[in-house]
Structure formats: structure tokens, C-alpha cells
């Protein structure tokens, strides 16, 4: 749909600029519609008096053109044009005429421009709220409740009781400038179940990114590495993990490093001398969002290559 690929686009409109639009936006009918997440709007049922009026005034050929555009993703040129037009035609006058002027400048239908604006504003306001939310801190319970699961795939455990992650490296993408990067989460080695945490500033926009992991316990009946939450970044890939591996026979532990795609290790327990084997085919972050951010990261890598 028209909103697909929004997350690929860089925006120079700040959260404050979007907030300045709030009075006009909230007073219009469109505020009653659900605010959809940035970049996750493949199917949108957008209804507004402006869009309906514009549609009724369109000729048959114009409607055909709109239908054709509806299947086209927004380009960076169109995103820049939308932001320029929003500044050129500020809020305060006739809302209908304003959005007609913006749509003409962008070269896309009114309803698609308003839809794109709504997604951008939602993302910007979330970014404004994120530091305050981060200041409240995260707990194992909140991360498990709000995060997404990280799982190993095709795990084989022979003579192994449990596998507990103590350090995990993730690939993330910045929520502001869409720059990919790596963050490593760590905790103590006492296995007390506390959160793994890691952070770093984005190398481009310097926004401070943080991720939290409520670690799981991998065993014969579970392949869950943990549950992850990102603040001002989007985790999309688990790279490797260092884990404590326990012997099924005696319970003694040893450290397995760089557990990830293609990992395989066979060793002898240092306490009871039983043979243990631990192998993994791959790792995945659950949900459609991670898949989306992987595509965004791939596009950004191609753009900067």
C-alpha cells in the first residue's frame, strides 16, 4: 500500500515540528482513526472527509492514477517533498486547501499524504516519550510482557542439561536515522536471572540506544534465548551469545562462547567426564517487525556501500 516502506525513509522533521501540528490534527476527523506504527502499515483503511471530498472531485482518469500509486512505496524524494510542503503550507488556515496544496507539491493523493504524515507524527511523538520511559527503567517482568522472543533454531543437546545466556550480541537499527549497528548485552555470571543490558550511541545521529533482554533457559523443551526490548532502536538479528552450559549428569557448568548460527561443540565434562554435545543451526527474533527491520538494514547497507 501507500504506506509500505515508510521506515526506510529518513526524516528531518523533528518531534517538536510534528507536535506543532497537533492542534490542527487532533481537531480533525482523522484523529479518531487508529494511529498505526511507523513502517508497519501495509494495509490501511484510512477515512477522512478531506480524502472523501477529494475522491468525489476526481475524474475517472485521476482515480485510476491514484489506484496505481496506491501500490507504490514512498520514495525518499517524495518524503522530502512532503516535509518541505508541510513547512511551506503551515497549519492554521483551511485544512482542506492546505492538504490539497501539499498533495499537489508531493505528487500523491491527499489521503496518502495525510496517512504518511500521521505515521511520521506517531513515530516522532513516541521518540519524544522514549527517554522518559527509559528513565523509569526496565524489569524482567516488563521486558517479558512487552518484548519479543529470541529463539535458537534446530538446537541439539546431548548430555546437556541447560544453556543460560550471559552475553548476547545483537544487530539493531537506529529509530531516528535508520543506521544499523551492533549492541552487546551483558550481565554477571552468577546466573541470578537479572536483565542483560547493553547500549551505545548511534554513530550517525548520536541518539543513545539501549536494549534489554530477559534471559531464558534453553533445555530439551525450550529453545528460547530470551525476550528483548529496544529503546530508540530496533533489534533485528541475534549475532552470537556466550552461554553457561550445564552437564545433564552432574550439573557442573562450562562457558560456551560465540553460540549462534552454525555453532557446534563436543566436549568432555570436566567433573564427571561424560561427553556433551551442543549444536545450533541459527537464531531468530520473532514477529514481523524484525523481518521488516532486516529489510531496512539491507537497504541502508546497499545505499551506503
Image (cartoon, rainbow, N blue to C red):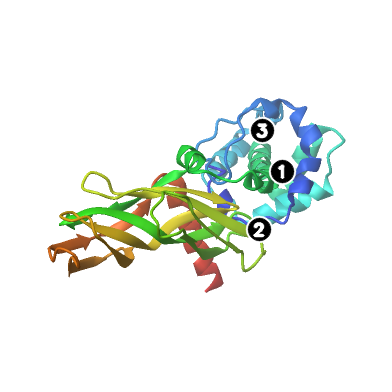
Disc 2: which residue: 77
Disc 1: which residue: 103
Q: What element carries label 1?
A: helix
**Residue in the image at 47% along x and 60% along y:** 186
Residue placed farthest to the left in the image? 274
Circles 2 and 3 in contact, beta carbons < 8 Å: no
- The quadrant in which residue 125 appears is top right
Which one is in front, 93 or 213? 213
Which one is in front, 263 or 126? 263
Q: Residue 133: x, y in percent?
A: 64, 43
Specify whether residue 73 is in view. no
Circles 3 and 1 in contact, beta carbons < 8 Å: no
Mark before the other along the chain sequence, 2 or 1 = 2
Which one is in front, 235 or 104? 235
Give how far apart the Cα atoms at labels 2 and 3 are: 25 Å
Which one is in front, 267 or 229? 267
Task: Using the image, determine if residue 6 lies above or below residue 241.
Answer: above
Give how far apart the Cα atoms at labels 2 and 1 are: 14 Å
Q: Is mark 2 on a helix, strand or loop?
A: helix
Disc 3: which residue: 58
Q: How many labels does the image show?
A: 3
**Residue in the image at 80% along x and 33% along y:** 24
**Nearest-to-viewer mark from 3 and 1:** 1
Mark before the other along the chain sequence, 3 or 1 = 3
Q: Is residue 183 left or right of residue 91?
A: left
Mark before the other along the chain sequence, 2 or 3 = 3
Task: Using the image, determine if residue 116 lies above or below residue 196.
Answer: above
Q: Residue 51 carries which label?
A: none
Q: Residue 114: x, y in percent?
A: 68, 38
Q: Is residue 198 left or right of residue 207?
A: left
**Nearest-to-viewer mark from 2 and 3:** 2
Q: What element carries label 3?
A: loop
Amino acid at each position: 500500500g501507500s504506506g509500505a516502506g515508510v521506515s526506510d525513509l529518513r526524516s528531518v522533521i523533528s518531534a517538536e515540528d510534528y507536535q506543532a501540528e497537533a492542534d490542527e490534527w487532533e481537531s480533525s476527523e482523522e484523529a479518531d482513526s487508529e494511529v498505526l506504527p511507523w513502517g508497519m502499515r501495509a494495509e490501511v483503511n484510512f477515512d477522512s472527509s478531506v480524502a472523501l471530498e477529494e475522491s468525489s472531485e476526481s475524474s475517472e482518469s485521476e482515480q485510476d492514477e491514484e489506484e496505481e500509486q496506491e501500490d507504490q512505496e514512498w520514495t525518499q524524494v517524495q518524503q522530502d517533498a512532503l516535509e518541505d510542503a508541510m513547512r511551506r503550507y503551515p497549519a492554521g488556515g483551511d485544512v482542506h486547501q492546505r492538504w490539497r496544496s501539499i498533495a499537489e507539491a508531493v505528487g500523491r493523493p491527499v489521503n496518502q499524504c495525510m496517512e504518511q504524515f500521521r505515521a511520521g507524527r506517531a513515530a516522532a511523538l513516541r521518540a519524544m516519550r522514549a527517554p522518559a520511559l527509559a528513565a523509569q527503567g526496565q524489569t524482567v517482568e516488563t521486558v517479558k510482557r512487552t518484548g519479543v522472543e529470541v529463539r535458537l533454531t534446530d538446537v541439539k543437546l546431548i548430555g546437556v542439561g541447560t544453556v543460560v545466556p550471559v552475553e548476547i550480541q545483537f544487530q539493531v537499527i537506529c529509530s531516528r536515522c535508520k543506521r544499523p549497528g551492533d549492541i552487546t548485552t551483558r550481565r554477571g555470571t552468577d546466573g541470578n536471572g537479572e536483565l542483560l543490558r547493553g547500549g551505545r550511541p548511534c554513530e550517525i545521529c548520536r541518539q543513545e540506544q539501549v536494549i534489554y533482554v530477559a534471559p531464558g533457559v534453553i533445555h530439551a523443551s525450550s529453545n528460547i534465548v530470551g525476550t528483548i526490548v529496544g529503546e530508540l532502536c530496533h533489534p533485528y538479528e541475534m549475532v552470537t551469545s556466550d552461554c553457561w552450559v550445564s552437564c545433564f549428569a552432574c550439573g557442573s557448568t562450562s562457558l560456551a562462547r560465540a553460540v549462534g548460527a552454525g555453532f557446534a561443540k563436543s566436549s568432555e565434562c570436566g567433573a564427571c567426564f561424560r561427553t556433551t554435545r551442543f549444536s545450533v543451526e541459527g537464531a531468530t527474533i520473532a514477529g514481523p517487525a524484525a523481518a521488516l527491520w532486516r529489510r531496512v538494514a539491507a537497504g541502508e547497507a546497499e545505499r551506503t556501500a
